[in-house]
Image: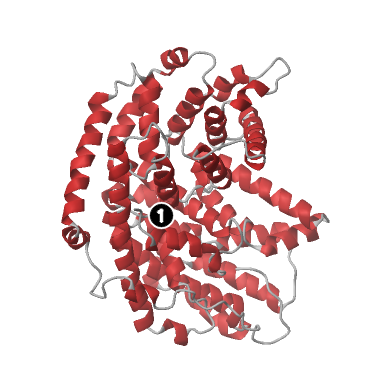
Amino acid sequence: MTLISSDEKRPNLAEFTPSIWGDYFMSCASNDDHSSLKETMENNKESYVKIIELKEQVKKKLLHGLHPLENPLETLEYIDDIQRLGLSYYFENEIEQVLKQFHNNNNNLHRDFGDNNLYADALRFRLLREQGYFIACEVFAKYKNEKGKFKESISSDIRGMLNLYEASQMRVRREEILDEALIFTTTHLQSLVETSQLSSPYLDLVKHALMHPIRKSFQRREARLYILLYRKLPSHEELLLTLAKLDFNLLQQLHQKELNYITRWWKEFDFKSKQSFSRDRIVECYIWNYGVYFEAQTSQIRLMMTKLISLLTIIDDSYDSYGTLEELRPFTEAWMWDISATDNLPEYMKLQCMVRAYSKEVQWLHNKYMPTFDEYYPIGLDNAGSEELISMAFCGMGDVVTKESMDWIFSQPQPKIIRTMSIVGRLMNDIGYHKCYIKQYGVTDEEAIEKLNEQVNDSWKDLNEDLLYPIAIPRPLLMRVLNLVRVNHEMYREGDGFTQPTLLKNLIDTLIINPIY
């Protein structure tokens, strides 16, 4: 929600852009009831059988064909390709087994790579940190000169520079060498792009990385792009490429059927006319959840969360652009009413905190009051609804979810990764934060944006730290939270992609509509 102003009793209705999708997905897939995974696979039996066969071959190579301690770089490259092609969810246990060997033998491998293999050092660093293993960033000190600056000579190593850039995205606070590495690599890589010193596919890889670093990237978009670039690399393996294309296209058919189902559900309940003041964004709600859960086995939770977020959008818009103070006060009180039924609900099933934040903003609007940044900051973070969304996301994770996991969501002090989700979701898209910051500190608009971006960057560092061992809850749960942060980053990277649907059209075309040939 953003701060708005109006002299009317009822706020001027926001003129939200109509849905750009309409009934499109009702015609692009079967209009039968939502197909199960089993039915989808049966309709594509040849592809399904081929995927099973190829998976076994990849698994066999991971466990027995690579010899990671004898061929460390080949092994790291193979795992990197699997992950970037969007196939790692098939091989999570095998990848963990191999990378654990790397972590346990880190000192020996460091010697094996030698003193001048930036590409190998950076690749190993990123993959191990992504897996939750802490690796000291001092490994990159040898690439500095006697003045403490990165050597200009490494700027000609394109693969090394690109991997150092990606490795620097894994930094935590007080890792100055990685802060410097990010500036150094970004500057040089941008220069290479601008001066056309690179040829395809490395030009495309660098351009994409500068806009979508792996750590922050929407996973399936990353997979699709890498599939298209990977086949141009001389070193590509046909086995992995075939598996990645089959997997992407088969899942895409399931996702199309899900959107067919969810579009019909939205239309049958007639939300568009009953809540005409609200944003008609059912497809964007689906994409939000697609970014958290894309796997076939998470189909039901993906659909459930799409429905829930569509309803939360209506609540948001009721407060933000339609309801009067007189109408919203009893609605807010209804959420706060301490009846015995709600007393027995666990914290993760309550939405009071978010609704209370909505109500506070309405009061400020009604009183024509511009809060200070310190006043607005905590209210805006509560407004983000991060705890509620994470609670819903955990519901699709089966037995890995425990009472302790749910209690962790609402623990104090707030987990850094949850705070990051709120900060990325609010500071990147809410103009109210900029106005309040300017009011409190008397800075220019540009200075306010710079300071808020610093907070977003620091929050990513905190997130990276929360994902390193020892971890508070099972890693599969933390990865869903990371995906939620990635979705927020994608939604608001170039503006409010949820409210302005044209910003997400290319993403949806790429992921849901266009197969890979």
Is 486 drawn above or below residue 338 in the view shown? above
Is 213 drawn above or below residue 273 in the view shown? above
In the foreground, 192 or 416: 192
Q: Residue at x 46, y 16 (%)?
A: 113
Q: Residue at x 35, y 38 (%)?
A: 82
Residue 347 showing in the rendered view: no
x, y (%) of residue 412? 52, 48
Q: Secondary structure at mark 1?
A: loop
In the foreground, 510 or 322: 510
Is 515 drawn above or below residue 111 in the view shown? below
Dot 1: within a 10 Å radius of its alpha carbon, few (fewer than 14), some, or many (20 or more) residues? many
Q: Residue furthest right?
A: 442
Left or right: 37, with 486 as reference point: left
x, y (%) of residue 8? 70, 87
**Label 1 is placed on what type of residue?**
Val
In the foreground, 442 or 34: 34
Q: Which residue is mark 1?
A: 292
